[in-house]
Image (spheres, rainbow, N blue to C red):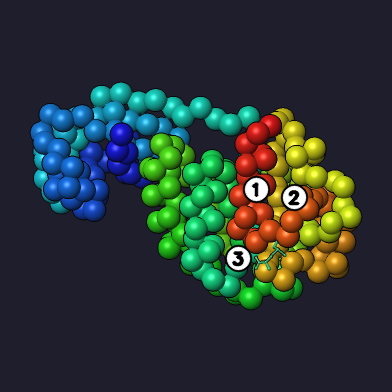
Amino acid sequence: MQLFFQPQLPESKFLDPDESKHCIKVLRKNIHDEINLIDGKGTFYKAKITEAHHKKCKFEILETTTEKKQPFHRHLAIAPTKNMDRMEWLVEKATELGVDEISFFQSFHSERKIVKIERIEKKVVSAIKQSMKATMPKLNELLPFNSILDNKGAINKFIAYVDFDNEVHLKDHLDAHKNTLILIGPEGDFTQEEVDLACKKGFVKVSLGKSRLRTETAALAAVHLMNLV
Ligand code: SAM
Protein backbone atom coordinates (compact mmCIF):
# COMPACT_ATOMS: atom_id res chain seq x y z
CA MET A 1 0.00 0.00 0.00
CA GLN A 2 1.26 3.47 -0.91
CA LEU A 3 1.10 6.20 1.75
CA PHE A 4 1.06 9.88 0.79
CA PHE A 5 2.47 12.48 3.19
CA GLN A 6 0.55 15.68 3.90
CA PRO A 7 1.76 17.37 7.12
CA GLN A 8 -1.08 19.95 6.97
CA LEU A 9 -3.79 17.34 7.51
CA PRO A 10 -6.61 17.46 8.44
CA GLU A 11 -6.93 21.10 7.21
CA SER A 12 -5.41 20.62 3.74
CA LYS A 13 -7.42 18.93 1.01
CA PHE A 14 -4.58 18.75 -1.53
CA LEU A 15 -1.43 16.70 -2.07
CA ASP A 16 1.71 18.77 -2.64
CA PRO A 17 3.13 18.85 -6.22
CA ASP A 18 5.59 15.92 -5.77
CA GLU A 19 3.00 13.69 -4.12
CA SER A 20 0.36 14.72 -6.71
CA LYS A 21 2.71 13.84 -9.57
CA HIS A 22 3.48 10.47 -8.01
CA CYS A 23 -0.18 9.76 -7.36
CA ILE A 24 -1.59 10.81 -10.73
CA LYS A 25 1.27 10.38 -13.24
CA VAL A 26 3.24 7.46 -11.77
CA LEU A 27 0.55 5.41 -10.02
CA ARG A 28 -2.17 6.53 -12.51
CA LYS A 29 -4.78 7.13 -9.83
CA ASN A 30 -7.97 8.77 -11.01
CA ILE A 31 -11.01 10.60 -9.71
CA HIS A 32 -13.01 8.51 -7.15
CA ASP A 33 -9.95 6.28 -6.42
CA GLU A 34 -9.16 5.77 -2.74
CA ILE A 35 -5.76 6.81 -1.36
CA ASN A 36 -4.09 6.53 2.06
CA LEU A 37 -2.35 9.46 3.70
CA ILE A 38 -0.35 10.23 6.83
CA ASP A 39 0.28 13.52 8.62
CA GLY A 40 3.55 12.54 10.39
CA LYS A 41 1.85 13.31 13.73
CA GLY A 42 0.23 9.92 14.32
CA THR A 43 -2.91 9.75 12.16
CA PHE A 44 -3.69 7.63 9.10
CA TYR A 45 -6.32 9.00 6.67
CA LYS A 46 -8.33 7.13 4.07
CA ALA A 47 -9.43 9.54 1.34
CA LYS A 48 -11.09 9.69 -2.10
CA ILE A 49 -9.65 11.68 -5.02
CA THR A 50 -12.05 14.41 -6.07
CA GLU A 51 -9.80 16.18 -8.64
CA ALA A 52 -7.08 14.09 -10.29
CA HIS A 53 -4.72 16.99 -11.01
CA HIS A 54 -1.03 16.01 -11.43
CA LYS A 55 0.22 19.13 -9.60
CA LYS A 56 -2.58 19.65 -7.08
CA CYS A 57 -4.49 16.46 -6.49
CA LYS A 58 -7.62 17.17 -4.43
CA PHE A 59 -9.07 14.62 -2.03
CA GLU A 60 -11.86 14.21 0.47
CA ILE A 61 -11.19 12.44 3.79
CA LEU A 62 -13.36 9.35 4.37
CA GLU A 63 -11.97 8.02 7.64
CA THR A 64 -9.15 8.48 10.15
CA THR A 65 -7.27 6.04 12.40
CA THR A 66 -4.89 6.93 15.22
CA GLU A 67 -1.57 5.06 15.30
CA LYS A 68 -1.05 2.90 18.39
CA LYS A 69 1.57 4.43 20.71
CA GLN A 70 4.63 2.57 21.98
CA PRO A 71 4.67 2.00 25.76
CA PHE A 72 7.75 4.19 26.31
CA HIS A 73 9.60 6.98 24.53
CA ARG A 74 12.78 5.79 22.78
CA HIS A 75 15.30 8.56 22.22
CA LEU A 76 18.49 7.90 20.26
CA ALA A 77 21.27 10.50 20.50
CA ILE A 78 24.23 10.16 18.15
CA ALA A 79 27.54 11.88 17.60
CA PRO A 80 27.19 12.22 13.80
CA THR A 81 29.78 10.46 11.66
CA LYS A 82 32.03 12.48 9.35
CA ASN A 83 30.43 10.75 6.37
CA MET A 84 26.91 12.13 6.09
CA ASP A 85 25.70 9.24 3.89
CA ARG A 86 26.33 6.87 6.82
CA MET A 87 24.39 9.18 9.12
CA GLU A 88 21.44 9.50 6.76
CA TRP A 89 21.37 5.73 6.30
CA LEU A 90 21.29 5.33 10.08
CA VAL A 91 18.46 7.86 10.51
CA GLU A 92 16.44 6.12 7.79
CA LYS A 93 16.87 2.69 9.43
CA ALA A 94 16.23 3.96 12.97
CA THR A 95 13.01 5.54 11.68
CA GLU A 96 11.95 2.28 10.04
CA LEU A 97 12.58 0.55 13.36
CA GLY A 98 10.31 3.08 15.04
CA VAL A 99 12.49 5.28 17.25
CA ASP A 100 10.56 8.26 18.72
CA GLU A 101 13.25 10.93 18.87
CA ILE A 102 16.69 11.44 17.29
CA SER A 103 19.23 13.96 18.57
CA PHE A 104 22.71 14.81 17.39
CA PHE A 105 25.45 15.95 19.74
CA GLN A 106 29.01 17.05 19.38
CA SER A 107 31.56 15.26 21.51
CA PHE A 108 35.32 15.65 21.90
CA HIS A 109 36.18 13.27 19.03
CA SER A 110 33.37 14.39 16.72
CA GLU A 111 34.67 15.29 13.29
CA ARG A 112 31.35 16.63 11.97
CA LYS A 113 30.34 20.08 13.19
CA ILE A 114 27.17 20.65 11.12
CA VAL A 115 24.04 18.56 10.59
CA LYS A 116 21.48 19.69 8.00
CA ILE A 117 18.16 18.74 9.58
CA GLU A 118 16.05 19.57 6.45
CA ARG A 119 18.00 16.99 4.41
CA ILE A 120 17.59 14.40 7.14
CA GLU A 121 13.87 15.17 7.41
CA LYS A 122 13.37 14.05 3.79
CA LYS A 123 14.91 10.65 4.63
CA VAL A 124 12.63 10.40 7.65
CA VAL A 125 9.49 11.11 5.61
CA SER A 126 10.40 8.48 3.05
CA ALA A 127 11.21 5.99 5.86
CA ILE A 128 7.86 6.43 7.64
CA LYS A 129 6.04 5.97 4.33
CA GLN A 130 8.09 2.88 3.54
CA SER A 131 7.55 1.36 7.00
CA MET A 132 3.81 2.22 7.14
CA LYS A 133 3.98 4.60 10.09
CA ALA A 134 1.96 7.74 10.71
CA THR A 135 4.39 9.33 13.17
CA MET A 136 7.70 11.00 12.36
CA PRO A 137 10.40 10.79 15.01
CA LYS A 138 11.20 14.19 16.53
CA LEU A 139 14.50 15.44 15.05
CA ASN A 140 16.69 17.77 17.09
CA GLU A 141 19.48 20.10 15.97
CA LEU A 142 23.14 19.37 16.84
CA LEU A 143 23.74 20.03 20.56
CA PRO A 144 26.91 20.34 22.63
CA PHE A 145 27.66 17.14 24.62
CA ASN A 146 26.83 18.84 27.95
CA SER A 147 23.34 19.82 26.75
CA ILE A 148 22.38 16.29 25.77
CA LEU A 149 23.40 15.18 29.27
CA ASP A 150 20.87 17.63 30.72
CA ASN A 151 17.94 16.01 28.88
CA LYS A 152 14.93 15.96 31.19
CA GLY A 153 12.63 13.69 29.15
CA ALA A 154 14.20 10.32 29.94
CA ILE A 155 14.31 8.35 33.18
CA ASN A 156 16.47 5.52 31.88
CA LYS A 157 19.65 7.05 30.48
CA PHE A 158 22.56 5.13 28.94
CA ILE A 159 25.92 5.84 27.39
CA ALA A 160 27.23 3.08 25.10
CA TYR A 161 30.99 2.82 25.40
CA VAL A 162 33.46 0.29 23.99
CA ASP A 163 34.82 -1.43 27.11
CA PHE A 164 35.07 -5.19 26.76
CA ASP A 165 35.44 -5.62 30.54
CA ASN A 166 32.05 -3.97 31.13
CA GLU A 167 29.52 -6.71 31.95
CA VAL A 168 26.61 -4.24 32.08
CA HIS A 169 24.72 -4.92 28.84
CA LEU A 170 22.02 -2.54 27.60
CA LYS A 171 19.52 -5.39 27.14
CA ASP A 172 19.50 -6.12 30.90
CA HIS A 173 18.64 -2.54 31.90
CA LEU A 174 15.78 -1.57 29.63
CA ASP A 175 12.36 -1.13 31.14
CA ALA A 176 9.17 -0.85 29.10
CA HIS A 177 7.70 1.63 31.60
CA LYS A 178 10.57 4.12 31.52
CA ASN A 179 11.32 6.65 28.81
CA THR A 180 14.81 5.88 27.55
CA LEU A 181 17.72 7.86 26.10
CA ILE A 182 20.84 6.21 24.72
CA LEU A 183 24.00 8.01 23.62
CA ILE A 184 26.10 6.57 20.80
CA GLY A 185 29.57 8.04 20.30
CA PRO A 186 31.63 9.12 17.29
CA GLU A 187 34.18 7.13 15.25
CA GLY A 188 36.83 7.86 17.90
CA ASP A 189 34.46 6.95 20.78
CA PHE A 190 33.74 9.03 23.89
CA THR A 191 36.61 10.20 26.06
CA GLN A 192 36.90 8.77 29.58
CA GLU A 193 36.06 12.26 30.91
CA GLU A 194 32.84 12.32 28.87
CA VAL A 195 31.84 8.90 30.18
CA ASP A 196 32.60 9.96 33.77
CA LEU A 197 30.59 13.18 33.37
CA ALA A 198 27.62 11.27 31.89
CA CYS A 199 27.73 8.80 34.79
CA LYS A 200 27.76 11.70 37.28
CA LYS A 201 24.60 12.99 35.58
CA GLY A 202 22.76 9.70 36.02
CA PHE A 203 23.68 7.82 32.84
CA VAL A 204 24.58 4.13 33.05
CA LYS A 205 27.62 3.00 31.05
CA VAL A 206 26.53 0.04 28.93
CA SER A 207 28.00 -2.50 26.57
CA LEU A 208 26.51 -3.65 23.29
CA GLY A 209 28.53 -6.87 23.21
CA LYS A 210 32.02 -8.06 22.50
CA SER A 211 32.50 -6.46 19.07
CA ARG A 212 33.50 -2.88 18.42
CA LEU A 213 30.62 -1.74 16.26
CA ARG A 214 30.52 1.16 13.85
CA THR A 215 28.52 4.14 15.12
CA GLU A 216 25.53 3.34 12.90
CA THR A 217 25.60 -0.38 13.73
CA ALA A 218 25.75 0.39 17.47
CA ALA A 219 22.82 2.82 17.14
CA LEU A 220 20.65 0.29 15.30
CA ALA A 221 21.57 -2.49 17.75
CA ALA A 222 20.42 -0.20 20.59
CA VAL A 223 17.13 0.65 18.84
CA HIS A 224 16.50 -3.03 18.16
CA LEU A 225 17.04 -3.86 21.85
CA MET A 226 14.65 -1.07 22.88
CA ASN A 227 12.06 -2.59 20.53
CA LEU A 228 12.33 -5.98 22.24
CA VAL A 229 11.23 -4.86 25.73
N1 SAM B 1 35.79 3.18 14.31
C1 SAM B 1 34.47 2.65 14.19
C2 SAM B 1 33.63 3.59 13.30
O1 SAM B 1 34.25 4.26 12.46
O2 SAM B 1 32.40 3.67 13.31
C3 SAM B 1 33.97 2.33 15.54
C4 SAM B 1 33.22 3.40 16.23
S1 SAM B 1 32.65 3.04 17.86
C5 SAM B 1 33.98 3.65 18.77
C6 SAM B 1 31.37 4.26 17.94
C7 SAM B 1 30.39 4.18 19.07
O3 SAM B 1 29.62 3.01 18.96
C8 SAM B 1 30.96 4.15 20.44
O4 SAM B 1 31.25 5.45 20.92
C9 SAM B 1 29.85 3.50 21.25
O5 SAM B 1 28.87 4.47 21.60
C10 SAM B 1 29.26 2.54 20.26
N2 SAM B 1 29.77 1.16 20.37
C11 SAM B 1 30.35 0.43 19.41
N3 SAM B 1 30.60 -0.81 19.85
C12 SAM B 1 30.16 -0.89 21.12
C13 SAM B 1 30.12 -1.92 22.13
N4 SAM B 1 30.60 -3.13 21.91
N5 SAM B 1 29.58 -1.61 23.32
C14 SAM B 1 29.08 -0.38 23.58
N6 SAM B 1 29.10 0.63 22.66
C15 SAM B 1 29.61 0.37 21.47
Q: Residue furthest front?
A: 211
Seen in the picture, residue 119 relative to 156 is either above or below; the reply is below
- Residue, x 54% and y 62% (percent of image)? 87
Which is more foreground, mark 3 or mark 2?
2
Task: Locate residue 186 relative to residue 95 in the image: left or right.
Answer: right
Label 3: how many residues lie within 10 Å, few (<14), some (14-19) or many (20+)?
A: many
* Disc marking residue 173: none
Would residue 114 be seen by someone viewing this image from the given angle?
yes
Q: Earlier in the sequence, mark 3 or mark 1?
A: 3
Secondary element at image label 2: loop
Which residue is disc 2 drawn over? 208
- Disc 2 under 8 Å from ligand 1? The reply is yes
> Marks 1 and 2: CB-CB under 8 Å?
yes
Q: Amino acid at mark 1?
A: Ala
- Disc 1 under 8 Å from ligand 1? The reply is no
Q: CA distance from mark 1 to mark 2?
A: 8 Å
Task: Locate residue 171 relative to residue 11 in the image: left or right.
Answer: right
Q: Amino acid at mark 3?
A: Pro
Which residue is disc 1 drawn over? 221
Task: Locate residue 90 relative to residue 178 in the image: left or right.
Answer: left
Q: Determine which quarter of the picture holds residue 145.
A: bottom right
Q: Amino acid at mark 2?
A: Leu
Which residue is disc 3 drawn over? 80
Q: Determine which quarter of the picture holds residue 198.
A: bottom right
- Count of residue discs: 3
Q: Earlier in the sequence, mark 3 or mark 2?
A: 3
Percent position of residue 126, x then y: 38, 49
Q: Quadrant of the N terminus?
A: top left
- Residue, x 27% and y 41% (percent of image)? 12
